[in-house]
Image: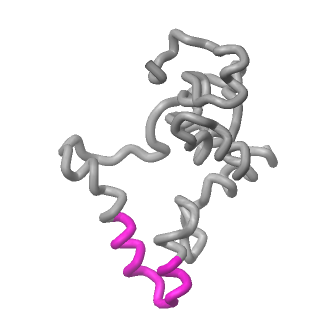
Amino acid sequence: SIHTKTVDKLGFLELFMSTPSHHRVHHASNVKYLDKNMGMVFIIWDKLFGTFVEEDKNEKVIYGLTENIKTHHPIKMVFHEWINIVKDLRKPSSLKAKFMYIFGAPGWSHDGTKKTARQLREELKKK
């Protein structure tokens, strides 16, 4: 199974396949891993679009969401992000801002109150 901590690296397969190591990064909430390793079977798309990152053995992978949702209700868990997008769409008055809430990077906000993964990584580099 690709969802395992038991398997470390898989040699040459690491070059082109989504391996357990790459998949751990995909499920991580560490800032350096946000929005990374989205490829399903092959990592070529992540490498082409700059979203690939190797698992860093010096940094423990923290699994989960960056912000936990406050429910265990299965329907609310599935649709919570869609509900949040609808709420976000009510905030700005400009059509461009509404467009960005739908198609912009996760964490984008019209007033800068939220941060994208790129902004969070930049802040981390400055520290």
Compared to residue 24, the image places residue 36 above or below, namely below
Q: Is residue 38 left or right of residue 47?
A: left
Image coordinates of residue 73 in percent, x first then y, are 18, 45
Image coordinates of residue 33 in percent, x first then y, are 63, 39
Q: Is residue 18 left or right of residue 69?
A: right
Q: Residue at x 22, y 41 (%)?
A: 72
Q: Is residue 97 magenta?
A: yes
Image coordinates of residue 90 in percent, x first then y, are 37, 81
Q: Residue furthest top?
A: 6
Compared to residue 85, the image places residue 127 above or below, namely above
Q: Quadrant of residue 46?
A: top right
Q: Residue furthest right?
A: 126
Compared to residue 100, the image places residue 10 above or below, namely above
Q: Residue at x 58, y 32 (%)?
A: 25
Camera-nearest residue between 28 and 6 = 6
Q: Residue at x 61, y 43 (%)?
A: 36
Count the marks.
Answer: 0
Q: Quadrant of residue 118?
A: bottom right
Q: Which residues are magenta?
A: 84-99
Camera-nearest residue between 114 and 44 = 44
Main SS class of the magenta portion in the image? helix
Image coordinates of residue 101 in percent, x first then y, are 49, 72
- The quarter in which the N terminus is drawn is top left
Q: Residue at x 29, y 47 (%)?
A: 70
Compared to residue 27, the image places residue 114 above or below, namely below
Q: Is residue 127 left or right of residue 20?
A: right
Q: Is residue 106 magenta?
A: no
